[in-house]
Image: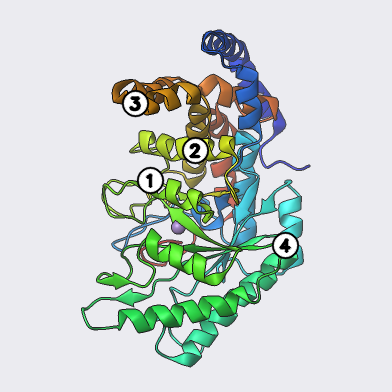
Amino acid sequence: METMIDGDVVAKENELRAKNLQSDFNALGEQLGRRGIDINAILAKVEAFGVAIPSWGVGTGGTRFARFPGEGEPRDVFDKIEDCAVIQQLTQATPTVSLHIPWDKADPQRLKQAAARFGLRFDAMNSNTFSDAADQSHSYKFGSLSSADAATRRQAIEHNIECIEIGKEIGSKALTIWIGDGSNFPGQVNFGKSFERYLDAVRSIYEELPDDWRLFTEHKMYEPAFYSTVVQDWGTNYIIAKETGDRAFCLVDLGHHAPNVNIEMIVSRLIQFGKLGGFHFNDSKYGDDDLDAGSIDPYRLFLVFNELVDAELSGAKDFDPAHMLDQSHNVTDPIESLMMSAIEVQRAYATALLVDRKALAGYQESNDALMATQTLKTAFRTDVEPILAMARQKAGGAIDPVATYRASFYRKKVAAERPAVASGGGGIV
Ligand SMILES: [Mn+2]
C-alpha cells in the first residue's frame, strides 16, 4: 500500500519515543490492573475504533467575514484524499472519508482507485442543497427539500438520489441530509406546511435508498436561516426518522444545539428508541463554531461517549453509530487539527471504557450522587495517552503524529506542487 509520508520518517520519529511509551504503557497497565481493568482489552477496542474524515475538512475554513487560505491547500477531491491518507497513516484512527457532492464530484472509478491506493474507504455521502451549483436550474435561496416550489423540491430530491448513485459505486452505505431551509422573518414560512413538504421529499429519497444503506438526517437550530429552521432540533429529527422508516436515523452534530443543551441526554434518548445514526464531532463555545473536537469541553465529549459505551456494553438495539468529524480549521493546518481531533474522539471513547459501570449502577441505585459522579471523574481523569499512542504504533502510525508530520515537511512539499487556491470568500470550503 502507498503512503504519502516516507515510512522511514515515521520509524525514525517513533524510535525517539518508543522506550518511554513502553514504560508509560506498563505503568498505566499496572494502575488499571489495580482497578480490575485489563489494559490490553482497552487497547484492542481502541485499535478497532475509527472516525471518518470529512473531505471538506482538509481545506482551510473561514468565517463569513474572511478566509485566510493556507499553503498547499487541496485543489480537488484527489488532493483531499491524499491529505486524508496522511491523517490515517499517522493516526491509524481515520480509515474512511466522507464526501460532499457536488464539491467532490468525479468519476467514481477514479475516486475508488484514489482511495484504494491508501487503503481508505468511503463513509456517508453528503448532499448539498444549501448552496447553488453553477449549472442548476432552480435556486435554493428560499429552500430546497421544503421549498414552496415543486420544481425546486424535485431538483433537491434528484440531487440526493444522485448522491446515493455515486455512493453505491464507491462503496458508501449511508446518505446524510442536512438542509439550510428555514426563515429569517416571523411569518415568512408556514411551519407546518414547510415541514410537511420536507417530510414528503425525504420519503421520496428514502424510496431510492438501497436495502443495506442508512439515511441520516441532521438537525440544526439556526444558520443559515436565523429565525427558524425546518429541522431545528432532535425532537423534529426524531419525528423525521420515525415517519420515514426503519433505515432512517438521526445524526447529532455537537455544534447544532443551543448553548448549554444537554447533548449527552439527547444521545441517550435516541439510543433508547433505536434512532441514533451517528455524529458530527466538533466543539464550540457559543454556537456552531466548528472548533476542533475536544478543544473546548473535553468532558462533554467524554459524557457523550459514556452514553455510547453504556449502549455498546448493554447491547442496545439498532446501535451502530457512525463517527465523523465536521469542523472548520481557520487558524491551524487542517491536517494537524484533524489528527488531534480524531485522537480526542478516540480518547473520549477510551476513557469512557474505563468507567466502573457496576459501581456506577450501585451508586445510582443508592442515590449516592457524589460517588456516582466521582466514578465518572475517575475514568475521565485517567491519562489514556499511552493506550492511544500504543494503538498507533502497533498499526504502523506515529507515536507523536504532529511531531512526525512536521518532521516530514509534507505541507511544504505539497505547497510546491499545489498552486494557491483563489479565495472563494468566507465559509466552509
Ligand atoms: Mn454537520
Q: Secondary structure at mark 4?
A: helix
Foreground mark, 3 or 4, reads 3
Measure the C-alpha gap from mark 3 to mark 4.
45 Å
In terms of sequence position, does the residue under pointer 1 or pointer 2 come before the other?
1
Q: Secondary structure at mark 1?
A: helix
Tell me the crowding category of disc 4: few under 14, some 14 to 19, or many 20 or more residues within 10 angstroms, Cα based. Answer: many
Q: Nearer the viewer, residue 187 or 337?
A: 187
The residue under label 3 is: 373
Q: Quadrant of residue 17?
A: top right
Task: Indicate the position of residue 95 as horizontal and vertical percent values.
Answer: 65, 44
Q: Is residue 394 left or right of residue 150?
A: right
Query: What colour-coding does the image apply?
Result: rainbow
Q: Nearer the viewer, residue 273 or 115?
A: 273
The type of residue carrying mark 1 is: Met
Q: Is residue 206 left or right of residue 327?
A: right
Q: How many marks?
A: 4
The residue under label 2 is: 345
Task: Determine whether 217 is above or below 143 in the image.
Answer: above
Foreground mark, 1 or 4, reads 1
Measure the C-alpha gap from mark 1 to mark 3.
15 Å
Is the Cβ of the residue at disc 1 closer than 8 Å to that at disc 2?
no
Task: Determine whether 82 is above or below 402 in the image.
Answer: below
The residue under label 1 is: 265
Q: Nearer the viewer, residue 238 or 130?
A: 238
